[in-house]
Image (tube, rainbow, N blue to C red):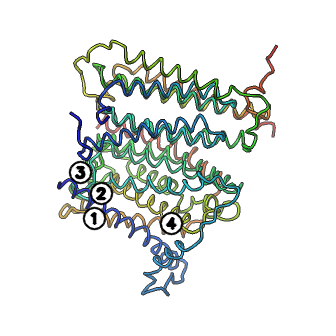
Amino acid sequence: MDELIRLLSYFVGIAAFLGFNLAYLGWVERKGAGHIQRRNGPKEVGPYGLIQPLADGLKLMSKQLIVPAAADKPLYMAAPILAMVPAVLLFVAIPFGEGIVPRQFDFGLLMIFAFAAFAGLAVLMAGWGSGNKYSLIAGTRVVSQNIAFEIPMLITAITVVMITGTMDLSEIVRHQAGGFWHWNIFPRFDSSLLMPVSFLIFYICSMAETNRAPFDLGEAESELVAGYLTEYGGMGFGIFMMAEYANIVIGCSLTTILFLGGWQCPFGILPGPHWFFIKMYFLIWCFVWMRWTFPRVTLWGLLNLSWKYLIPFSLVNLLLTALFIKVF
Amino acid sequence: MNPSLFSPEGLAEVIFLILIGTTILGASIATLSKRLIRSVIGLAICFLGVGGLYYFLNSPFVAMMQLLIYVGAVCITMTFAIMLAEPDDEKASRKYKSVSTWAAAPLGGLIAYGLSRLAIQGQWLAPAEKINSGSVKDLGMSLLNEYSMVFELISIVLLVSIIGSLALARVGRRKQ
Amino acid sequence: MLTISAHLNTYLIIGAILFGFGIFGLLHRPSLIGMLISVELILSGASVNFMAFNHFLAPDPTVGQIFTLFIMGIAAAEAAIALSIVIAVYRNYQSIDADDLTDLKG
């Protein structure tokens, strides 16, 4: 019976956390974008524009869902759902605090990567199902970007797994206990000397995986309008946006857990979920900061970055990490 | 012996039945639908169901690799190839008649029935003592100790297939 | 009905059904990519069989898992090469119907 209560409270908690984040990350982004560009962000609706996301949600919900005539209806309707479901499902595996994890998986890291692979299929379904040539081309670009950046992400995650010896996310965080010099991002002699490189590669790849920051060809620039999201209006678009923010939260949580010590305090005194949230929101703020600072890359620059630079770097990093672990 | 429906074992069985349904639904969409892109999505659904079955067979690692490799890579590659090779699927009216459904379905059903009967009537040896527990750690140990040769061979196979498929796909580009 | 996940026969029947679907698809679908999809179904049926025997009857439960991982690897390599061949065929014949590729006939 108390197992049931525990599950229900996690369910409610994650739903509340997710709902709050998905709405208010949009607010953070728009305010941040505004102030970086030397203007105010939304300020009309409520104090400091805090009710803006609710107004946006109401607007999206009240729009008519127009399905284009040439669209493949089952694919068109199923794509937003397929984009949203894995992103929400992965919160089951993320440890927010000591023992505060909905379900303990021995292979939590692998599960996150496996379910993130569904996103590519959802984008292809959206691109094809819209019945629009430009959506199709944008969709294939996004998927080739996703596949290209998934590889260095997996390889650098393997370096962390090699150091810790387990794929269990709670165990990886517990390994980094006791002061911030134990975090996986800092080079040490009993882990590898190249961990900052791993962190950098992982962070760039997670930015590219979530179609964010300078790597957002698929939705902002591509061809004419909004890439694979062109034919989606109202709540279909809303669900895709929410799925993107959920992916950003998961990507930043994963980076926090793997490299920055999860719920561990920098000085070893008061570990708890508050540190997790501080670190995660700091990384999300860096995402927002980089989006409005860097210009967008071209497709060939993007794919060159992955195949010609990041993959060789991450492979060499893997070999050198293995060497360090064996020698020291 | 039969667990009640709302106990954890009962709910697990219900999920197992849903997974079997998903697998068979995916396989039927993959083989019966007229448009190729829908059959690739059906294949992805089938792989999802099979991944769930692997989870019930006590190997979550293989289940996650199934999702990562098949759904995340193979289905996406097939979708790319469909987009490059058959963009208009209104050519569903073929010039030549394929083997009709009514001739091929009994053959497939007969093979499935024959295999099931063979499997059910087989005298399988009694389960022996398990020498390790089949966890991920044991998997890694046996992969690198007893089966290291196969591991190296499959990496060579994958390397050769990458080089081969790049060489095949490049041929048209030099003419442009 | 509620304890079928603990019997070996369930998984063997599922493997056989997937195999049957694969054979049906291989005969029924005229295009090359359709045939590749059916071949993937056949490989999945065989993998389910391997994993079922691995769980219920094998003394070393890692062998079946390793074999299944290798089947996945080989299937992925085969899909990559087959799709390259399909693209090359499409460039030359402008069709991927198996009945259109008749250069070596007669």
Q: Residue C56 or C78: which is nearer the viewer?
A: C56
Q: Position of residue B111 (x, y in %)?
A: 52, 19
Cβ–Cβ under 8 Å for marks 4 and 1: no
Above or below for B67 versus A12: above
Q: Is tag 2's residue or tag 4's residue first in the polypeptide sequence?
A: 2
The residue sitting at 32% across, 34% down in the picture is C1
Q: Amino acid at mark 3?
A: Arg
Q: Residues within 10 Å of mark 1 (few under 14, many from 20)?
A: many
Name the residue beneath numbered marker 4.
Answer: A290
Above or below for A181 versus A110: below
Q: Along the horizontal axis of the image, is A315 left or right of A10?
A: right
* Of marks 4 and 1, the one in the foreground: 1
Q: Position of residue B29 (x, y in %)?
A: 56, 39
Q: Chain of mark 2?
A: A
Q: Quadrant of residue C78?
A: top right
Q: Amino acid at mark 2?
A: Gly
From where the camera sits, is residue A319 visible?
no
Q: Chain of mark 3?
A: A
Q: Is tag 3's residue or tag 4's residue first in the polypeptide sequence?
A: 3
Q: Is tag 3's residue or tag 1's residue first in the polypeptide sequence?
A: 3
Cβ–Cβ under 8 Å for marks 2 and 4: no
Q: Quadrant of the C terminus of chain A?
A: top left
Cβ–Cβ under 8 Å for marks 1 and 2: yes
Name the residue beneath numbered marker 2.
Answer: A262
